Every structure is written in structure tokens, then in C-alpha cells.
Image (cartoon, grey):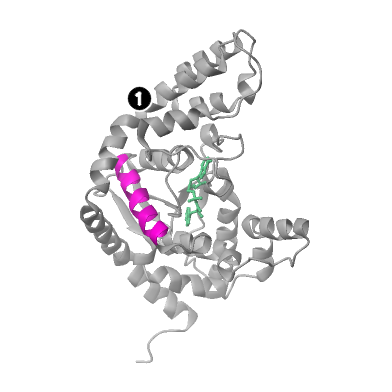
Amino acid sequence: NTRVLTGITPSGTPHLGNYAGAMRPSIEASTQPGVDAFYFMADYHALIKCDDPQRIARSRLEIAATWLAAGLDPEHVTFYRQSDIPEIPELCWMLTCVTPKGLMNRAHAYKANVDQNALRGTDPDDGVTMGLFSYPVLMAADILMFNANKVPVGRDQIQHLEMTRDIAQRFNNLYGGGRDLFVLPEVQVDDDVATLPGLDGRKMSKSYDNTIPLFEGGAKALRAAIMRIVTDSRGPGEPKDAEQSHLYMLYRAFASRDEAAQFRRQLEEGMGWGDAKTQLYDYLENILAPMRERYIALTARPDRIEDILQAGADKARKLSRPFMDQLREAVGLRAVA
Ligand code: TYM
């Protein structure tokens, strides 16, 4: 069987990028024969970006409910919270001890911070915590703990997967004694939706404040957000450059090939941006409305979500506990007698 694993950081409200870039493809993958799926809320990762306990608590619930509303079947998928698996931070420490600092110096999230400080003329490490710096090691622990073969993610996570392989290889060489303790995971990026643009055309991201919420605020908020998508100034009747249009990219991420081609033709034949936005809204609302109903019902019963996640953690720990014993033994931390 192929083990597929992915996570989402619960530090904000789930948006279209999370859904199209991570949830939808991973739910699809989980229904394929021969696939064992492991999907989780990366709530220890959330602490790196967010020090508001209420926001984290709310986001954990929202992300879990979204995943379930989108069709994740907890009977088939091992569905859990990172923070319910104590073996993950334990493994994170073991990996930290074999990870060269120079490797982490190259991590995008850290480098972006350093570059920003350079622009501001402040100390390079201003605002950088050890959590942010070693973020990729925790992510490697998430993946290696369950020996995932495939990790479906958006393009922004590719570097983290490369680092995970690098760290796994070092650990295998040091402690494997000729055999591999860790599987080297493969990254899986869906090319059609590799990076969903946000309202301003940059990658849709909590950190850019340019997201289109999936469910929050209902149909009204969805419409309002879509109406705010930035377009060029070409008026109705003028041919549009679909390939450059964020509206088209969003439409394409959800529609079938034929529907996307038709939308594209209409834009090239001069459909006005206002009409295009209305079409995009109608299309999305049609897909999202039934999911939103399930989402509202789910968030009204947090006790049920808690039960599902506890059951998921139990399933996951049946694997992580014995594997951690093996790893402790491998590094020389086994019981004396
Ligand atoms: P996070 O929470 O930033 O994003 C979750 C997933 O959504 C994808 N994504 C997007 N895809 C397309 N277009 C977008 N605009 C967009 N925005 C986000 C991300 O690529 C990601 O796949 N570090 C990870 C969480 C994580 C993880 C892991 C993932 C922790 N441990 C282990 C896989 C395996 C993160 O912060 O994702």
C-alpha cells in the first residue's frame, strides 16, 4: 500500500487555496484503492505563527470541520491533530540533532524574514524564533513518523519535502546500520492548482491577507470577496488575456476542462469582468453551498469532532509508539534492562 500524508496549519480560517491545493486532492487520493491516508492539523506549527490561543482553538475546529465537510471519511483516513501525537515532537528532537544548521539557513520562510530585515536595516534575525528557524525539522518529523510515501501539497512546500528527504537520509546513514529506518517521501503537486492566486494576484495566503474564505460569512462573503478580485482595466467588449487573469485561474481550479475552456473563450471574446465575476461566484457557490451546510452542522457539534480526532489519534499512535521504541533503540536510548 501507498501511504499518503499531508497537513494543514490551523492558524486562520480555511480558504479556497487550502481547499483546492490540499484538501480536495488529498480526499480524492484517499479514495483510491491501495492508499492509506494520514491527514492532520499541524497545530504545533500553528504556534510558530500565532500566539493567540483562542484563534488557534477556533482554527483547529474550523479546519477539522472543513476537512470532514469536504468529504474526508474518518473510517478510511487516519485523521488527527499533530499535538495529540507526543512521538512527533520527540522525533523532532532526534532529527534536530542530525540536521545541519546550514540546511535550515536556506529555508524559504526563514530567509524571507532575514531579507525583510535587511530591507528595514534591522538585525538579520529580528523577529525570528527558533520555532520558525527549525520549522522544516518539525515538518520532517510529521512525515517520517508515519513513513509516508507521498505528500500532496502546494508548490510552496516543495522545499520542505526536499529537506525532509535530506534529513531522513542522514538519519538512515547514521543509525540504520545498513537498512533504512525512514522511507524517503515523494512530493506530489497538482499542476492545475499548484498555486491558487488570492484577491491581489499573489499566492492566496493567510500571511498576505488576500484569501477568499471557504465558508466563513456564507454566500454573501464569498460574493463580496470575488467582487474584490483585482483585474486589469479592459472594459466589456475588449478581449481579455485569460492566461494572465486571476479570475480564470480560480475558475479553472474548480471547473472541468470543458467548462474552463468555455470561460476562457468568453473572456477572449470580450466578456466584461463584472459578468466573469458573477459567473465565477455562481460556479463556486454551487459547489460550496452543500459543503457549507455540512460544515455548519459539524461546527455546531464540537464534541463529535473531538471524538473523531481522539479516535484518529489512537489509530496513529498504534503506529507511532512502537516505531518510536525502535528509533530510541537505534540512537542508543533503550531501557537498560
Ligand atoms: P499551510 O497550512 O500553509 O497550507 C496547507 C496546504 O495548502 C496549500 N496551500 C495552497 N495551495 C494552492 N494555492 C494556495 N494559494 C495555497 N495556500 C496553501 C499548501 O501548499 C499546503 O499543502 N507546513 C504546512 C503544513 C504541514 C505539512 C506537514 C504539510 C505541517 N506538516 C507535513 C505536509 C506534510 C503548511 O503550513 O501548510
| Residue at 32% in and 54% down | 79
Q: Position of residue 125 (x, y in %)?
A: 69, 67
| Residue at 38% in and 91% down | 336
Is the CB of mark 1 within 8 Å of ligand 1? Answer: no
Badge 1 crowding class, 10 Å Cα cut-off, few under 14, some 14 to 19, many 20 or more, is few
In the visual, does 195 lie left or right of 221? right
Name the secondary structure under disc 1: helix
Q: Position of residue 127 (x, y in %)?
A: 64, 65
- Magenta region: 54-69
| Residue at 43% in and 64% down | 145
Using the image, determine if residue 286 lies above or below residue 325: above
Q: Nearer the viewer, residue 29 or 153?
A: 153
Using the image, determine if residue 300 lies above or below residue 28: below
Looking at the picture, which amino acid does disc 1 mark? Asn
Q: Position of residue 155 (x, y in %)?
A: 57, 44
Look at mark 1 in the image and give the residue it sits on. 286
Q: Nearer the viewer, residue 8 or 329?
A: 8
In the visual, does 120 lie left or right of 296? right
**Magenta residues: mostly which secondary structure?**
helix
